[in-house]
Amino acid sequence: MNGWMGKIIQIDLGSNRQQALPVTPETLRRFLGGRGLGVKLYTDLCPDPLDPFAAENALIFMTGPLTGTVMTSGRYQVVSRSPLTGTICDSSSGGSFGAVLKSAGLDGLVIRGRADHPVYLFINDGGIEVRDAADLWGLNTQQTQKAIHERTPAKTSVACIGPAGENRVPFAAIMNDRDRAAGRGGMGAIMGSKNLKAVAASGNRAVVIADPEAYQAMNARLDRAVDKNPVTGKSLQVLGTPVLVNVINAHGMFPTRNFRSGVFNDAEGISGEKIAETLLQRQSACYKCPIGCGRTTKTRNRQGEGPEYETVWAFGAQLGISDLTAIAEANYACNELGLDTITMGSTIGCAMELHEAGALGEKMLWGDANRLVGWVQDTACRRGFGAELGLGSRRLAAKYGRPELAMQVKGMEIPAYDPRGAQGMALSYATSNRGGCHMRGYMIMPEILGHPVFLDRFSTAGKPEIVALFQDIAAVVDSAILCRFLQFAMGISTFSEMLRAVTGLDFSDEELLTAGRRIYTLERLFNNRAGFMRADDTLPPRFFQEEFQTGSSRHRRVRLEEMLDAYYAVRGWDAQGAPSAATLAELGL
């Protein structure tokens, strides 16, 4: 079929046995690729929830039908059960690894079993070779990528883990293209549990385009649309994602000192503008990306990519730190060691409040920039108090008797938008299938940035329908797979057009939205089997009980119960959050 390569390989690292997994054209149409097809394969292979570190657990690398074709199409998704949350989880990364994996002849790679010694996989023209990685074990992610590049053909792309993944830190990331990360949910720890250091890919196979003429015309229009949009054509190009620091702070919802305030007094000092003034070396971009939101930066001692908005917050306002150099160097350390910056920073913030409350003896002080990089290094190595930080905030706070101080949903730490300032974002966090995540349904677009229209951020009216719609569209984009920033410049009809031009199939807007709903519902079914129900669709008590006293979101609380029943009704789920038989029949699940 046009768009897909027609090959998914399963490999068992224990026996080195490889087999092709057949996927019907109907399944491809219903689940697309990426996140959707990955979740479908995972739930078929592991219908009963397994320990994420069990040898038989599956770890799935997926491309999509648009991978390697249109703009921003170098992405890939990794799907498994998260060791951080216990939920179904997919983690997405940019760069070029997804496009190279597809050019090597694969739509996807399913990894099961556990090698008896460190290995890496080399994929070339559809074949998979298991190679020894004993001398790579212990190297950081950049050293690993460099070493594998020296052993493989030019233009090989590498996705690998660092010491955090080797040590099974439950929020370990998979890194590719030096500083690109499949960051959330601990997929790197699952690689470590399988003694898998890296996956390297090389190939020259082209994706067959069904309608080249329509494809070329569409690409020209998309370039113009991205260029004319103020977010993709200006803000992200000029300042990258940290452009949001001053915007969210002005809305009084920039989480500060473990979400106890929504205003950081030195936000300007860690803003995108300040990064451009003091650290920026050049703009960078992923595969076929006209936006170029990446920032190559340099401190006096170090150089790397980032920090992104979420990382600026996690190591900045969340900890009461305004030292931009310390923030950047903690980010570089996370990239090298393979750690999710959001969970890392938020867990440190939780520890700081635990210490302040007298529940934790370890000295963890607000604003302590000098120890920040050391905490990151100790966490990746599970050394000293880093072994405690490596638990993640939920397990850490529970261990020290103050579970309410962990700012998480289903075990995943909430990112840099305080939900008291946007009721739709609060509902999206609570109902996210992978835990506290802004990318399941990015309600900041309409509630703060006014796209496609401005919505009253403090109102709950109409939010259940819109949150569900945004979640479904996100599932489609994550399955195609493209960068989510394109949603600022184009709607669902453009994604339908892309798929028609590339695959030749007559995708309609309605069919794609149904696919998004089907994917979201299948994820929910797995979570139900894993024990997640209505009681888990909630937020930490702070957001219901405590109001800000300053800022433009002052005197506000989250009003989740006003929205949850209506959201379940929109989804076709019962009062406990389980999909009804009628919904399952409608979606063919």
Image (cartoon, rainbow, N blue to C red):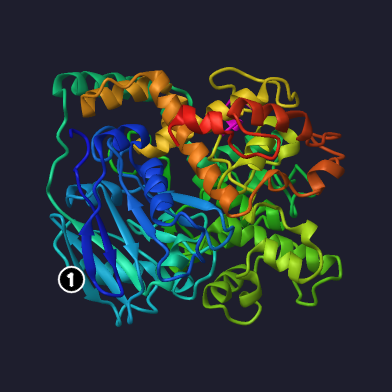
498 or 163, nearer to the observer = 498
Q: How many marks?
A: 1
Looking at the magenta stretch, what is its main secondary structure?
A: helix
Q: Is residue 552 visible?
A: no
457 or 150, nearer to the observer = 457
Residue 14 against residue 338 in the figure, above or below = below
In which quadrant of the rendered image does the N terminus lie?
top left
Residue 258 against residue 26 in the figure, above or below = below
Amino acid type shown at disc 1: Arg
Identify the image quadrant of residue 553: top right
- Region in magenta: 442-447
Tell whether 509 sits left or right of 49: left
> Regarding mark 1 in the picture, which secondary structure is present there?
loop
Residue 278: x %, y % from top left = 52, 50
Residue 447: x %, y % from top left = 64, 26
Identify the image quadrant of residue 395: bottom right
In which quadrant of the rendered image does the C terminus lie?
top left
Which residue is at a point 81% across and 64% down the rendered structure image?
402
Mark 1: few/some/many CA within 10 Å (<14, 14-19, 20+): few
Residue 293 against residue 383 in the figure, above or below = above
Residue 234: x %, y % from top left = 45, 29
Residue identified by numbered label 1: 151
Tell whether 8 sits left or right of 387: left
160 or 37, nearer to the observer = 37
